[in-house]
Amino acid sequence: MDLSFSPDHAAFRKEARSWIEKNLDRTWSDALRDPAMGEAELVEFRRAWQRKLNGAGYLGMRWPKEWGGRGASGVEEAILAEELSGADAPEIPNTLGLHLCAPALIHHGTEQQRRRYIPAMLNADEIWCQGFSEPGAGSDLASLRCRAEIQGDHFVINGQKCWTTYGPYADWIFVLARTDPNDRYGGISFILVDLKTPGVEVRPLKQITGESEFGEVFFDNATVPRENLVGEIGQGWQIAMTVLGYERGAQSLAWAARLGSDLRALVLRARELGLTDAATRARLGKLVVDWQVFYSNAYRTLANLADGKAPGPESSIEKVFWSEYDQRLRLAALEILGPGGQLTRLSAHATKDVDWPRDFLWSRAESIFSGSNEIQRNILAKRVLNLPQG
Amino acid sequence: MKFDLSDDQQLLRSATADFLASECPIDVVRQVAESKGEGFSRAHWSKLAELGYLGLVVGERHGGQGLGPVELAVVCHELGKACFPGPYLDVVLAAKALEESGAASDVLESVLAGKSIAVLARRDTVWPGDKSNLRFSGDRVTGSSFFVPHGASADRLVVVAGDDVVLADGPFDVTPMPTLDEAQRFAEVKLDNPARRLGARGLVDALDDLAAVAAAAYALGLGEAALQRSVTYSRQRETFGKPIGSYQVLQHRMADMLLRSESSRAAVYRAAWSLAEGSADAGLVVAAAKAYAVESACAITRDSVQIHGGNGFTWEYDLHCFLKRAITLDQHYGTTIAMTDRALVAFEATL
C-alpha cells in the first residue's frame, strides 16, 4: 500500500498550482456568480478559460501528444482536476466534447476526422454537445429512436435529442442514431452533425435552477455527409460505452476537493452565525466523516489507476456516493443556514462564496444524469454482486 | 501509488484467513460464545501466541513482529469476518502500552507468550452510570473499572488512574456486566490491587488511533461477512417462484450494503496507512474511518437480518452474532458520536 504521490507527481502539482495562481483571475469566479451576467457572456468566459488551459497544455491530459494531448497519466490528470477544483476554476465549455467525442475520434475515427475536429475542440473554437438522451430514452438509452437513413453519400436524420448540455451554445453535436431498427445495440451509429445543417433546430430547455444551459435538438430530414460517421455503421453503442468508461477515475479527486471547499464554507458560515448547538455539530460532523470516506474512495480509485488497473463497475459506487453526498451537503446547508440559506444572488445578504439555493437545486440533477443512481445500483447488483436477473 | 496490500501483507491476510477457517469457523465461535466459560478458547489463544499475533505491533527487540497499523488492520479485518471472540485487540493494546512503557518487560514477555493475559481497560468507555474513580498511591490502585473486556480472564490490567497509567496485578474482584453481545464478557472490576506505574496517561492516549483503526477494520470484516451471507441467501431463497435476490428492491438494498462495505474498506485502509505514515491528517482520517465503518457494519448487519426474513430473527442463524458485535463496537474504542465530533474538531482546526 502506498497512497503518497511520487516526487514527479508532487512536482507536477506544484507546477499546475502555480500556473493556476498566475492565470486564474480571481474575479472570474465572482463574475461567474454575478446575477447580472448573461448566460451567453458566461459561455464566453468559459471559452476564454479553456483557451488558456489549452495554451498551457492542460487539456487532453491522457491523449497522445500527436493529437494535441499531453501524454500524461491518469494520476496527473486527477491532480490537475483537483487543483482546478480547489481553486474554484470555471468549468470549460467543451467538457463533453473533450471527454467523450475526442476519445471516440482518437480510438475509432479517421485521420481526417481527427485533424478536422480535435484542434478546434481543444481551443473551444467549436463547442460540442452530446446527442445521446431522448425524451423516450434516458436510463434505457439503447431504446433510442432518432433515425439515420443512408441515402447515397449521406445520412438523413430524423428525431429528437434532449437534456443536451450546452446545446444552445454549441456548434456541433455527436449523435447516437439508429441505423437499423431491428438491432437494439448493433443498430446504433455514432455520427457528427453540424448544428447549422438545415433541418436541425436547437431550443433551450429551462431547468429548475432557472438556467438554460440544457437544450433540445430536433432533426427534420437533416442531411449529413456519410464521412461524418465515426467507426463503422452499427458500432455506435460500443463506441459510446467505451468512451463513457475513459473518464472514470480521474474526476473523483476533483469531486472530493470541490466537496471539501463547500463543506469548509458551510462550517465557517455556521461558526460566523454562532451555530454551535449539538444538533448542528452532529450534522456537520457526519458531513466531515462522509467527505473523508469519499476522499478515501477517490484515493483508492486513483491508486488503482496508477497501479495500471482499469476502473470497473465499482465506479458506480463513486457516482452514487458523490451525488448523494452532495445532495446531503446542500440540503444540510439550506436547513442549517436558516432562511438566509435560501437567499439568491440578487440579495445583498446572500453569501458570496457559495450560491447555496442554486447549488441545492442543481444537486437534484446529480442522481439523475450520467446514469441515474437507480441504474448504478442495478449495475452493482448485477455486475458486482452477481445477483440473479429479475 | 498502490492501494493493494504488499506481498507480505497479503501473505499475512491469507495465513490469518486460513487459520480462522480451520480453527474457528462460525459454529466453533458460537459454541464458545454460548458456553458458560470465558467467551473465548484458550486453545485458540495459545495458537495466536505461537503464531505471533499477540505481539503483532510490538517491536522485534521486545519479542514482537514489529509490524504496524496496516498489518493490524489486515488481521482485525479477518477476525471480523470470522466474528472471532475474545480480548485480542485489548491484549494487543496492553502489550503495546507495556512495550512503550518499558517498565514491565517480564510481563510483556509472558503476555506475548500467551502465558498470562493483560488487557487494556480503556478510560473512554464511559456511560452515565460510571462511578469509576481510580486512584494510584504509588504501589496500589483502588477504585472501580467498568466494561473491562474479558475482565474475568485477565491476570493483569492496564488502567488509567488520574494522570497515571498503571499495571495492576490480579487476581481481581470481578462482577460480570452482561451486554446484548453474549460473546463479549465485559466485567466490572473492583480494584484494591498491587500496581506499578507504566507512565503518564499520554501513553494510553497515544494508542487511541491504533485502537480505532483496528476496531474499524474488525467492523469492516463483520459487514463484509454479513453482506456475503445476504447475497448467498438471496440467490437461493425463493418467493413467488423466483429467487428473492432477483427482486430490485432487494438488489438495491444490497447495492447500498456494498457501497457501505467498499467505502469502509477504502476508509479503513487509508486510515491505517495514514497512521503508519504519520500523515498530518491521520487523526481526521482515523476518526472518520472508525465512525463510518462501525456505523456501516451496524447498518449492513441490520439489513442482513431483514434480508433473511424470519430466519434472520432466529437464534439458529448466525447473523445476530455479527449484528451484536457491530453494536458493541459502536460504543467502544471511541464511540461513533465521539468520533464524529473528533472528525469535525480536526477539520475545524484546518480552517
Image: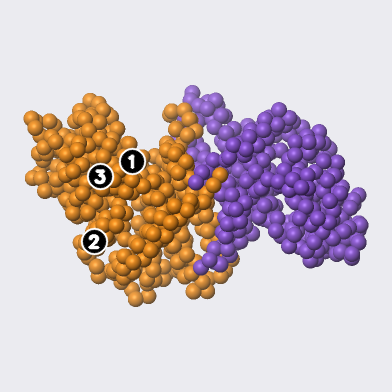
Chain colours: A orange, B purple
Per the image, label 3 sits on a secondary structure element best described as: helix
Q: Which residue corresponds to mark 2?
A: A48
Nearest to viewer (mark 3 / mark 2): 3
Labelled pair 3, 2 in contact (Cβ < 8 Å): no
Labelled pair 1, 2 in contact (Cβ < 8 Å): no
Q: Position of residue A242 (x, y in %)?
A: 33, 36
Q: Which residue corresponds to mark 1?
A: A244
Instruction: Return the chain for callout 2.
Output: A
Left or right: where A177 falls relative to B330 = left
Q: Which residue corresponds to mark 3?
A: A67
Per the image, label 1 sits on a secondary structure element best described as: helix
Q: Are marks 1 and 3 on the same chain?
A: yes
Identify residue type, mark 3: Trp
The residue at 53%/58% (across/down) is A288
Q: How many marks?
A: 3
Nearest to viewer (mark 1 / mark 2): 2
Q: Is A125 or B212 nearer to us in this picture? A: A125
Per the image, label 2 sits on a secondary structure element best described as: helix
The residue at 44%/33% (across/down) is A383
